[in-house]
Image (cartoon, helix red, strand yellow):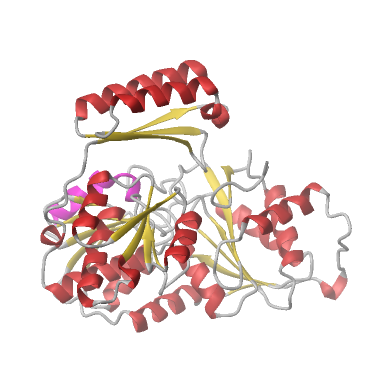
């Protein structure tokens, strides 16, 4: 069982679970693995703990003789993209994405801008566990150099502008940057396209990141979009790999709906590879039905962008993502990019001449209840008693709904999802499962 890496890199409460010492060791081990003569690119989100961890991981990399370029506050997808485009040997992001302020994390990308495969993460863990036995440390002038390049986020914007030279002069756009890594990049890109941009929560505030704002609090973007009479509202998470939208009427458009809108548009143009879109086990049954009615094959993957990407590669799909707004457009990047998602949705609105409310018209969701249970041991869902209880509840709605109970990959939570035709019935089922898990924990 892995001890350091989870489903999306390393996550933990900063300075308790994710310490400067651990960050140093991760940087050192990664430096040995990717020591091929090229530099590492290191970026971060706005969390108060990010500079501490960024400097620690950079020191670890430099200590084994590898140069480091620090790009400052940048969205996670910018690090992924620039690692590949600028031929870095690896990219590192210090961020805990959508998690609360007290958390932080470390994600690593390979030279292609892809998140590390399990075996490489396991190798890093093993090197640390073995206390770097068999690895010699350089000294003197063989140490790596650490430099800062403040131009990198503008290079990221410049690259996207070449890919998406949109004219958005007729669009009024509200942007909620969640006090996170997109505070500069998204408004700058949309302004470059001529849009009228109304920014919210766009100061780099490490104590407010994701607090009652951004993609995890969609009610905020809904209200300010209507308040400003905007055409669209864009809400990012703290590191910019997710985006949730609001249409001009204040209705939230989640990741599944965004994929449906874009997927239908590409299919109509003959550009949707294999007429296939990849979602996850969390995707609403109503969305699956809508894809089917549109002639699009909808495939479910486990939750987590690495699993979505694996399924996309198996299916030959170019679009895949999650209800949370984490969407991968494989022709643009190997990870979710909230700004790219926004640009693609805006291009659909511009090409069709339709408001977002009309593009999402006719989408009917099955009622869905999501409940989080805090636990000390996430392995509790493997208990035979818990499994049997869930199976018994599934039989109650067989053919009319479904139940998914899983452990969070980044927090000490058990996530319970119940979906079905009757809202009152699924609420009762979710409550019963929650109470049972709480009694077992």
Q: Left or right: where does residue 282 sit relative to residue 387?
A: left
Viewer-closest of 318 and 107: 318
Which residue is farthest top? Answer: 439
Indicate the position of residue 418 as horizontal and vertical percent values: 32, 33
Q: Residue at x 67, y 52 (%)?
A: 23
Indicate the position of residue 374 as horizontal and vertical percent values: 47, 28
Q: Residue at x 28, y 70 (%)?
A: 344
367 drawn magenta? no
Q: Left or right: where does residue 343 sit relative to residue 185?
A: left
Range shown magenta: 215-228
Indicate the position of residue 379 as horizontal and vertical percent values: 57, 30
Q: Is residue 13 above or below residue 237?
A: above
Viewer-closest of 335 and 418: 418
Residue 264 shows up from this direction: yes
Q: Is residue 43 above or below residue 69?
A: above
- Dominant secondary structure of the magenta stretch? helix
Q: Residue at x 38, y 61 (%)?
A: 320
Residue 369 shows up from this direction: no
Where residue 318 sits, quadrant-wise, is bottom left
Q: Is residue 365 above or below residue 318?
A: above
Where residue 164 sits, quadrant-wise, is bottom left
217 drawn magenta? yes
Indicate the position of residue 427 as horizontal and vertical percent values: 27, 26
Viewer-closest of 8 and 219: 8
Check the picture and name the quadrant holding the N terminus.
Answer: top right
């Amino acid at each position: 069982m892995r001890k350091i890496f989870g489903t999306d890199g390393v996550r933990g409460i900063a300075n308790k679970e994710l310490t400067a010492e651990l960050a140093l060791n991760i940087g050192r081990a990664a430096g040995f693995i990717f020591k091929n003569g090229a530099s590492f690119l290191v970026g971060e989100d706005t969390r108060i703990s990010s500079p501490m961890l960024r400097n620690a991981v950079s020191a670890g990399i430099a200590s084994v003789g590898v140069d480091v370029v620090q790009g400052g506050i940048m969205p996670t997808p910018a690090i992924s993209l620039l690692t590949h485009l600028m031929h870095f040997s690896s990219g590192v992001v210090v961020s805990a994405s959508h998690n609360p302020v007290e958390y932080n994390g470390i994600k690593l990308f390979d030279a292609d801008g892809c998140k590390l495969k399990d075996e490489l993460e396991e190798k890093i863990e093993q090197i640390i566990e073995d206390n770097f036995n068999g690895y010699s440390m350089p000294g003197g002038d063989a140490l790596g150099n650490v430099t800062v390049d403040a131009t990198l986020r503008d290079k990221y914007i410049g690259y996207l502008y070449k890919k998406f030279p949109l004219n958005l002069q007729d669009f009024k756009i509200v942007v909620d940057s969640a006090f996170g890594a997109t505070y500069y990049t998204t408004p700058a890109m949309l302004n470059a396209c001529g849009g009228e941009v109304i920014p919210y929560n766009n100061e780099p505030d490490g104590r407010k990141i994701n607090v009652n704002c951004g993609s995890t609090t969609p009610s905020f973007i809904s209200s300010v979009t209507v308040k400003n009479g905007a055409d669209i509202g864009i809400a990012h998470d703290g590191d910019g790999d997710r985006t949730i939208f609001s249409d001009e009427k204040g209705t939230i458009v989640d990741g599944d709906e965004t994929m449906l809108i874009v997927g239908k548009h590409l299919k109509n143009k003959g550009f949707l590879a294999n007429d296939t879109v990849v979602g996850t086990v969390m995707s609403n049954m109503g969305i699956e039905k809508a894809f089917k009615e549109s002639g699009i094959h909808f495939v479910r993957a486990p939750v987590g962008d690495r699993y979505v990407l694996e399924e996309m590669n198996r299916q030959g799909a170019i679009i895949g993502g999650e209800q949370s707004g984490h969407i991968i457009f494989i022709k643009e990047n190997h990870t979710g990019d909230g700004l790219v998602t926004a640009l693609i949705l805006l291009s659909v609105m511009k090409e069709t001449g339709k408001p977002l409310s009309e593009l999402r018209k006719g989408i009917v969701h099955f009622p869905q209840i999501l409940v989080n249970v805090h636990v000390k041991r996430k392995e509790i869902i493997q208990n035979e008693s818990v499994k049997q209880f869930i199976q018994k509840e599934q039989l109650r709605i067989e053919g009319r709904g479904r139940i998914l109970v899983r452990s969070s990959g980044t927090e000490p939570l058990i996530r319970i999802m119940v979906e079905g035709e009757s809202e009152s019935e699924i609420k009762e089922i979710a409550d019963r499962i929650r109470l049972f898990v709480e009694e077992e924990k």
